[in-house]
Image (cartoon, rainbow, N blue to C red):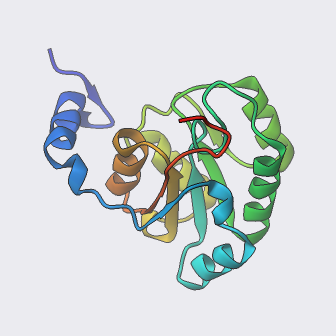
Amino acid sequence: MNFNVDGMNVRKIFANFLIFGDKIEPTMIVEDIKELDSDYLDVLKESGIKGLIVDVDETLREMFHKVPEENIEWLSLAKSKMKVAVVSNGYNTQIREILEQLDIPYFDFAFKPLKININKALDSMDITGEESLFIGNSQLTDMLGGYRVGSKLCKVKKNKQSNR
């Protein structure tokens, strides 16, 4: 049985990942999202990045925990510098409320690495994949999803609040 989403066979996407996934190299690697400070965001903007697509779990927060206040402040800072959208394979009421207060688009149940909701995030910011930086922790969902839409890639090695 074939399962098609976004015009692509999901089995084929994952089979290709198993073969080529380790070949997808992030543009940059950070230990924590806050390493992308004001100066770094300015450099990204000067290099042509117009928007950020940000993952939730293990990027903005430790899995199933509240978003730390300093990461909410980082989102606010990032939004003051460029466009921001959040794309998550999950859903969380606290995340939705925070992002509504910050007026940041939230695309939940995104089925990353499928492109459909990543493209919706790009459309919400009125930018192309090439003008975006996808920030996430997962090689399978975030890096592959960002790669598939042409984004630059920033891999977050771990959330500093995580014990992993």
Along the viewing direction, whichever of 25 and 160 lies nearer the viewer: 160
Coordinates of residue 147 in the picture (x, y in percent): 34, 56
Residue ID at (50%, 56%)? 134
Residue ID at (38%, 61%)? 26
Q: Is residue 46 left or right of residue 9?
A: right
Coordinates of residue 136 in the picture (x, y in percent): 51, 48
The quarter holding residue 42 reads: bottom right
Residue ID at (56%, 26%)? 90
108 above or below 51?
Answer: above
Toward the front, the furthest residue is: 163
Residue 103 appears in view: no
Residue ID at (34%, 48%)? 144
Coordinates of residue 62 in the picture (x, y in percent): 64, 34
Residue 118 appears in view: yes
The quarter holding residue 8 reads: top left
Toward the bottom, the furthest residue is: 46
Along the viewing direction, whichever of 100 and 20 lies nearer the viewer: 20
74 above or below 93?
Answer: below
161 above or below 52?
Answer: above
Toward the top, the furthest residue is: 1
